[in-house]
Structure formats: structure tokens, C-alpha cells
Amino acid sequence: MPEIGIGIVGGGYMGKAHSVAMAAVGAVFDTGLRPRLEMIAATSADSAEGYRRAYGFSRATADWRELVDDARVEAVIIASPQATHRAIAERAFAAGKPVLCEKPLGASLEDTRAMVAAAEASGLANMVGYNYIRTPASQFVRQLLADGAIGQMTWFRAEHTEDFHADPGIPADWRSQGEANGCLGDLAPHIVNAALALAGPIRALTAEVETVHPTRGGVAVGNDDQVQVMCRFANGVMGHLFASRTATGRKMGYAYEITGTHGAIRFDQEDQNAVWLYRSTDPDAERGFRKILTGPAHPDYVEFCQGAGHGTGYQDQIIIEARDFLRAIDSGEPVWPTFRDGLAVAEVIAAIRAADQSRGWVEVEPARS
């Protein structure tokens, strides 16, 4: 099995997740390529060396350019702050190296479009790190919808709610400043991606963006805490999206409800191994939501565990993502979500900002070829 040298820019929360995933993916899936942890980059030599020792990389650097330019680094994973994504991706593509970039793709719509242009001009594998939609449960839901299990979709509601900024006494930090670090830049892209994956393109929307706690420790907060969106999908379905980092009690409230003419589906990431399915075709005495626990019959489950109901976890989502990235490199075929799919999310986020400013309905400008 041929090896491929992996370079990861950023060693923090997601840098660790991707490092673990690349170290484990070959043992979980029968991949055509075997990742080799070649180099990791961080903001200082000391932190980079610490990450190297902890995660098992061969080398470390404090300069991401050294990582991208190194001949033994054959694919690049970007797990650094959003403002750095464009420069790293453009340099990697120019050097002939595939890129997996954490979401959201760029720090601005302009950056995102430039990254898509660079990716598509290179002809190389490119992916965006939307991991939650990769759970066996949500993959199963996509199959149910494709198979028409609940009939024609008539309504879609989704949320991404957490409470890490619910307490107004939490002091201001980096999350309190900059559009990219607000709820709309951080949490909302995940649930927009889910909406696009499950219900299709969004045609138009109206939205309200809110800063719940305008100051923290006497420091003005420079970004938003929550956002609500009313939307109409291209297929005519009515929808509602909500994202909040001040949703007291919610830890990973990535949840959706889908109503159809013959049934309904519910899912909540806090119970990520279960799908709730209602079929109106069931006998009257048995009609109601049934809880389906994921197991070997569901997508990408059996590779982790042969027992139904035992469940997969967060890190497993990243391992599935690693498998998909390696598959895209090995096959030469795009694997969803590509950079262009990341642009589709960015276009919706831009429309949300515009709708909040205009206090009216805004047409969503589609990602263009």
C-alpha cells in the first residue's frame, strides 16, 4: 500500500483531531493510501515540537510555508485560524498538493471564492471539514430522503446550539471579536451545510443576527451570539435555521426535524447514534416516532464496531472524513463536500448578513462555475 506524507497546519483542537484520524484511518478502513504523519506546523517552535511528540509526527516547524513547500509533505490539512486559510491553500495548490481545509473555508466571501478558483484550477483533491453530517445516523437520513421514505418534504428545521457563551460573566476573549469568530462565522456554517445536504439549495431568506451579551468584563463584544433564519429552499420547501452560542444547557445541539407527506425524521447530535422516524403508513395502533439505533447496517458503522447500539463518537466522524480525503486523492474523483460546496455555505452566510442589514428577504446568490 503506497504511503502519502501528511502535513497539518495547526495543532490545537482540530489539529489534534485530524492527527489522530490520520494515524488511525488505515486501521479502520481499507484505504488505498496509507497516511504518514510527516510534519506539523504551529505558531512557535516550542508548541510545534510539543505537538510533534504528542501526535507522532516526524518533524515540526513554526513556519507553515516550510511545511507546504517540503517535498515529503504530499497533502496538506489546514486546521489553523480562518484568516490563514486562503494563503495556505493557494500555496499548497500551487505546489501540487491536495488540501483538506477546516470550515468555514475562508474568512470572507472573497477569500472563499479565491480558494475555490485555486482548487479547481489545480485539478487536485479538495475538501472542507464538515464532519457532523458524516455520522452514520445522518448518512442514513440522507439515504431515507433519497429513497422517498417520508414522501415529499414539506418543512425543514435545523439548529446548532451550544452554551459556551451563555454566562455573561465569562470574560472577553478571542471568540468575542471578529466576524469569523462569532456564532454566524463559527457555528452557523455547520447547520447551513446540513440544510444544503438534506434539503438542497436555499433560494431566499430573511434573518436576524443578535449579540445577546454586548459586553464581557467591561469589554465590548464585537460579534454575534445567535442568529435565526427563515428560508425558502429551491425545491419550494419552507425552512427555519437557528444557531446560538448562548443556548443554556445545550452542549452540541446540532439537530434537525424534517416533515414529509408520508412521515417525519428527527435527529439530535447529543444523541448522535439515534434517528427518530415516523411513517404515516404504519398501522394506527403502531403509529408514532420510533427510535432507530445505528448499527452495522448503517453507513460507515461496522468498520468501527460490529455491535448495534454500541455507537460511534466525535473522533470517528473525523476518521470517516480522513478516509474520504484519501479516497479523493487516490481516485482523482471529487468527494463531497468540495471547496465549491464550502462556497455554497459561504454564499448563504453572506445572504444572512445582508438580510440582517436590510431587514428584508434576500435572494441567495448561487455558487458559480
Image (spheres, rainbow, N blue to C red):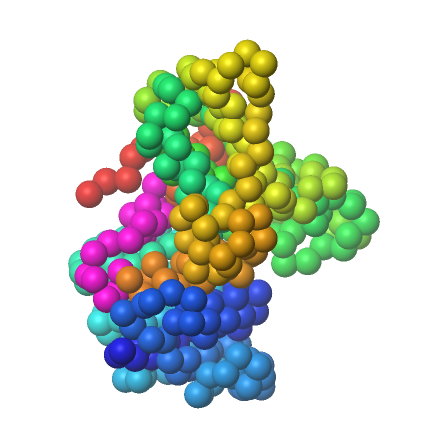
The quarter of the image holding the N terminus is bottom left
Please provide percent x and percent y for residue 229.
52, 28
User: Can you say whether 112 is above or below 124 in the image?
Assistant: above
Examine the structure image and report whether residue 342 is included in the region drawn in magenta.
yes
Please provide percent x and percent y for residue 280.
48, 16
Task: Tell me the residue at 20%/56% (across/down).
Answer: 333
Please provide percent x and percent y for residue 51.
55, 80
Q: Which residues are magenta?
A: 328-344
Q: Quadrant of residue 198?
A: top left
User: Can you say whether 94 is above or below 108 in the image?
Assistant: below
The quarter of the image holding the C terminus is top left
Name the side, left or right, on which 173 lies relative to 178. Answer: right
Task: Tell me the residue at 58%/14% (across/down).
Answer: 285
* Residue found farthest to the top: 284
Name the side, left or right, on which 174 lies relative to 60. Answer: right
Name the side, left or right, on which 361 lies relative to 330. Answer: right
Q: Quadrant of residue 69?
A: bottom left
Task: Give the camera-side residue of 95 and 247.
Answer: 247
